Amino acid sequence: MVRALVVVTLACSIAVSVSAQAIKKGTTRSDAAQASRASASADTGAAAAGDSEVVSGFVLDSLRELPLAGATVLITNTTFSSITDPSGRFRFVVHGLPDGVYKVGFFHPTLDSLGITPPTQEVVIARGKPAFVQLYVPSAQTVVAAACPDSARGGDKGLVMGIVRDASSEKPLSDVRVVLMWTGVSVAANSVLKVPQATSVLTDDVGTFRACGVPTDTPVRLQARSKTGASGWIEVSVPPNGLALRDVLLGERPTTVAEAPPAVSAPTTGAPGAGAPGHPDTSAAAARKPAPLGTAMLSGNVTSAEGKPLEGAMVLLLGTQLSARSDVNGAFRLTGLPAGTQSVEVREIGFSPKRFAVDLSPRRPSTLTATLDERTNVLKTMEITAKRGSQIAGFDQRKKSGLGYYMDLDQIQKSGAISSTDLFRQVPGLTVAWDGEGYSVQVNRNVTGASCPVQYYIDGSPFLSMGDDLDQVVRPEEIAAIEVYKSSAETPGQFQGADGGPCGTIVIWTKRRLGTTDSTSN
């Protein structure tokens, strides 16, 4: 139905030169018929005047349901060719062709690189009569069926494909490994577990990669890797039609593990947004400004779904310490970035963090318009009724022991944290780092001298974290208290688990464990 609507609309646009905005509004069948008659009449006059035939039409990109611009259209076994304009239209004025049936086809550099061969269409060319032909890129289902075996498609499985190019020269790169990772679900006898899954493929001699068997409607992380560098981890999702297209720029990049972003600080005076709750101290950040990792630049704007500029939003290049804040107009600018396809995260108080894939080139600046469209829930005023001390069993006694680090409700509320892992950025001895999949909390030193992820308890029960899913399970506004133990020696016995908690333990108590009641302030 969508394809039919686009076909009818574009046919009308050829006759009456409607704008792109008019295409979105749709066109009736009667309008299309009138436009076709008007177009035929005009083209017939042109043909009669020049004793030539007119062949016109358009090319539709069925994968994106958009007109295909820049395609070269050919009449087979002739020298006639035409290039489609931005609306996908083309037009031949052919001279000297005998009347008959001809085949019309097209090619496009991107489709050729992906190995997609569009079908040809037959057209009848007769002296004095205009001809109209519709050409299509094969559908997503056709492409997936041709690229993937039966076992790797259909149902909830699809295809991710694209071209990997050098960020500097923009030439296709062969023998580059493209890694895709996602989280699957394993249903056991008495539990449902999250299971990390991955696949990888190599690009061919024209830089094309095809990864079959990728689940549909599931967040997938993708990275291109070579001997000299890697792209950032970017997020893709295979739609229900089974095909996701994503090209990747690959640039040289140092392989370093990112440290935690600047810690949350108390309110201070100064530039707008500086020192506000949830914002890092700009003076401290300037004193330890991270070194540039390249020559690429990214600029843009941060707005709400209503188009309102958002001041003080943090734009962070994931996997690095490079970040910037938006000004009063919502504008930001990041310099010294590594070239290639990277992922940035945009954060602002009152909104859920959002990630965007950006193609960074050392040859020209890149731009991003980041729209934060998902607001976080704002809780009603909480009235906490409790006995003297904490209502959490043993919390006050453990705090008095001097072992561990503790955060109460007042500290948590003042932190202005956007996600739960933000609460641990200011805890001595812990590191919050981007590991390619999400933010993970690690103890800086343990008995082996290395960093390792902590174990979690939520409301007294073990929580088997997969590294980056803590932020998805519990929000900062739901937390009443936190206990942090950085080694098994200081971890209380009830929180050590079967392995003794060698990497440390974080105990999270939610407000459900407190006697809280909602009260609306007048």
Image (cartoon, rainbow, N blue to C red):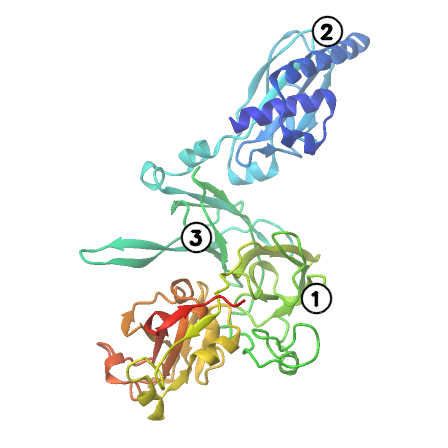
Residue 327 bears which disc, if any?
A: 1
Left or right: 409 in relation to 120: left
Is 176 drawn above or below residue 506 in the view shown?
Answer: above
Foreground tag (3 vs 1): 1
Secondary structure, mark 1, is loop
Q: Does residue 231 show up? A: no
> Which quadrant would residue 393 be assigned to in this image?
bottom left
Secondary structure, mark 2, is loop
Is 472 drawn above or below residue 207 in the view shown?
Answer: below
- What residue is shown with label 3? 219
Indicate the amino acid at tag 3: Pro
> Which quadrant would residue 146 be assigned to in this image?
top left
Foreground tag (1 vs 2): 1
Residue 380 in picture, x, y percent from top left: 48, 66
Indicate the amino acid at tag 2: Gly
User: Real-space Cα distance between discs 2 and 3?
Assistant: 55 Å
- What residue is shown with label 2? 128
- Upstream in the sequence, badge 3 or badge 1? 3
User: Real-space Cα distance between discs 3 and 1?
Assistant: 31 Å
Q: How crowded is the residue under tag 2: few (<14 C-alpha within 10 Å), some, or many (20+)? A: some
Left or right: 253 in relation to 82: left
Q: How crowded is the residue under tag 1: few (<14 C-alpha within 10 Å), some, or many (20+)? A: some
Residue 62 in picture, x, y percent from top left: 54, 32
Residue 40 in picture, x, y percent from top left: 71, 12
